[in-house]
Every structure is written in C-alpha cells, then in structure tokens.
Image (cartoon, grey):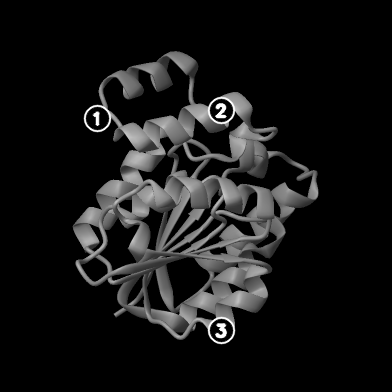
Amino acid sequence: MIVLEDIQTYASNHSSDLAPLLAEILDFTLSNHAHPQMISSREQGLFLQFLSSMIRPKRILEIGTFTGFSGLCLASGLADNGELHTLELREEDAATAKAYFKRSPLNEKIHLHIGNALETIPTLQELWDIVFIDADKTGYIDYYDLVLPKMAPGGLIIADNVLFHGEVVKDPLTGKNAKAIDAFNKHVHNDVRTEQVLLTVRDGLMLVRIKK
C-alpha cells in the first residue's frame, strides 16, 4: 500500500459519501471479486466525479469497465446530451457492470462494448472530452496513441495505476507491468503535444491534456 493506512482512513473520513448504488458496487466488488484491488477506491471515484462534473463532458471513453464503478462515477457529470462509451474485455465483468448500469438513471447514456479495446476504439467516431485508461498495463501506450488524435479541444486523458504499487521507483525494474507503466509514463512525459501531471492519488493518476 503506497498511502499509509491511517492517512487513507483519515482522508476517507473527511470525504463525501458515495451515492448508494456506487457504494453497493464498491462493497460487492471488494467482497466477492477474485481481483478486488482492480476497482477504483472510494476517494478515487469521488475524484472522477469531481472532474467530470467540472468539465460537463459530452463524450467520455472508458477503457476498462471492470464492474462499473468508475464508469458510473464519470457518467455522473455528463452533459444533458452526453454519452459514455465503456470497453471491457471480460464478459463476466461486463455482465456485472451492465446489471448495475441498468439500475442507474444514467443507463440510457452508457454504451458498453465487449471485446478487444484496440479493435473497438477505431470504430468509435467520436471526439472525446474525457478518456479514462484503466485496463491491461502493457496496452497503455497503444491506447494513448489511439485516443490522442480523437480528443476534443481541451480534452482530458486520465490514466490509472501509473505508480503500479510503488514498483515504478524500484531499481532495477522487475515485472512486465511495472516496466510497461514506467515506459508509458516516460512516453507521455516526452510527448511534446501534451502537458501532464502525475498525482499520487491511491496507485497514481496521470492527467494529460493537449497543449493549446
């Protein structure tokens, strides 16, 4: 754990409550999923809600639906005519997310795509106001390069797990995921088209915006 447990508890105690459906998704996933660490934290979900509500996006792309928690957090800030497209490779997780989406008043604004994101992204003819990348770490650079030309003016790319459990600062780097994330972070930092800030929220969030 990167953040000390007592600091995390203090932060949680001084943050807003989640909407009941979001709290249910989080509790269900943490209690029942084989890989509960893959879900965004409560505070991270609230942060995504904040960003989305401030931007009021018309189009959001989420790469990595998982059980639907982060997608619903992002969708909460959509403009009146907004849509969220969310991509998931695993059918079981997609089914769980779909069941929760159906219970949300935002359901009509959410489009769930099951399959390989690298194949799906080129078929979506949209300009994205927000893109959230939270999928296989070895694919981050490919996802980034695919979506960057499709960003709306002032659009925001958010990449999760960019500290990868703190492994990115180890010397030498070990493990394919830590190496892939470190390569992604360097790729973004060296991209002259964008400006970025890496936040130490939970497992690390990279915020990327195209330069004006």
Q: Which mark is residue 16?
A: 1
Q: Which mark is residue 5?
A: none
- The mark that comes first in sequence, 1 or 3, is 1
Q: Nearer the viewer, mark 2 or mark 1?
A: 2
Whether label 1 touches label 3, CB < 8 Å: no
- Residue to which mark 3 is pinned: 123
* Label 3: how many Cα within 10 Å (few below 14, some 14–19, many 20+): few
Instruction: Identify the residue at horizontal 34%, vertical 76% (top origin).
Output: 211
| Amino acid at dot 2 | Leu
Picture quarter with the C terminus: bottom left
Q: Is residue 193 left or right of residue 54?
A: right
Whether label 2 touches label 1, CB < 8 Å: no
- Residue to which mark 2 is pinned: 30
* Residue 67 placement: quadrant: top right
| Amino acid at dot 1 | Ser
Query: Mark 2 and mark 3: span between their CA atoms?
Result: 33 Å
**Mark 3 residue element:** helix
Q: Nearer the viewer, mark 1 or mark 3?
A: 3
Task: Give the mark count.
Answer: 3
Is residue 1 visible in the rendered structure shown here?
A: no
Looking at the picture, tell me which residue is in the foreground, 25 or 149: 25
Image coordinates for residue 108, horizontal then vertical, percent: 34, 63
| Amino acid at dot 3 | Thr
**Mark 2 residue element:** helix
- The mark that comes first in sequence, 2 or 1, is 1
